[in-house]
Image (spheres, rainbow, N blue to C red):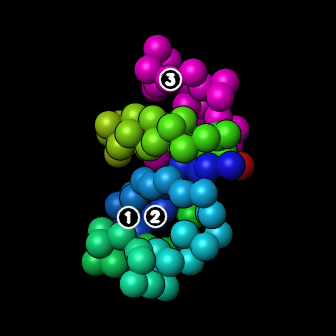
């Protein structure tokens, strides 16, 4: 399994990433581990806001890319429960992702 996730940072920004080990990756961001993203190291990751599961890396990467293209408001809407198909219809097959 692969995961696409959104993390809230201390400055209220949202970081989007992809991994095959969600718990480990989130801890790396929050603890500022040597493997965390430069962005979350400088913006202080606070918590996991939302995540989607997919069966392979390619699907997870596609979703990560599409989420990164969204506006901050659209990302906030996704965090608040909006379905990814609302913003990404025609760009990805939303049925291939499961919110966790």
Residue matched to label 2: 8
Residue matched to label 1: 12
Picture residue at 56% right of the left edge, 77% below the top: 27
Q: Distance from label 2 to label 1 (Cα)?
A: 6 Å
Residue matched to label 3: 92
* Residue 85 visible, this orientation: yes
- On the rendered structure, is 68 left or right of 80? left
Give the crowd class for mark 3: few <14, some 14-19, many >=20 residues within 10 Å.
some
Q: Position of residue 83 (x, y in %)?
A: 60, 31
Q: Position of residue 57 (x, y in %)?
A: 54, 44
Q: How many marks?
A: 3
The circle drawn on residue 96 is: none
Q: Report the span colored magenta.
A: 76-99
- On the rendered structure, is 1 left or right of 59? right
| Helix, strand or loop under label 1 | loop
* Label 3 vs 1, first from the N-terminus: 1
Q: Of tags 2 and 1, which is closer to the observer?
A: 2
Picture residue at 54% right of the left edge, 57% below the top: 19
* Label 2 vs 3, first from the N-terminus: 2
Residue extending farthest to the top is 90
Q: Distance from label 2 to label 3 (Cα)?
A: 24 Å
Residue 77 against residue 35 in the figure, above or below: above
């Amino acid at each position: 399994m692969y995961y696409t996730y959104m993390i809230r940072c201390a400055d209220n920004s949202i970081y989007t990433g992809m991994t095959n080990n969600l718990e480990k990756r989130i801890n790396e961001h929050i603890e500022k581990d040597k493997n965390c993203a430069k962005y979350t190291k400088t913006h202080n990751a606070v918590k996991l806001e939302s995540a989607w599961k997919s069966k392979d890396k390619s699907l997870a990467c596609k979703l990560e890319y599409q989420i990164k293209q969204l506006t901050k408001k659209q990302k906030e809407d996704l965090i608040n429960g909006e379905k990814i198909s609302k913003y990404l219809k025609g760009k990805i097959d939303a049925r291939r992702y499961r919110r966790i």
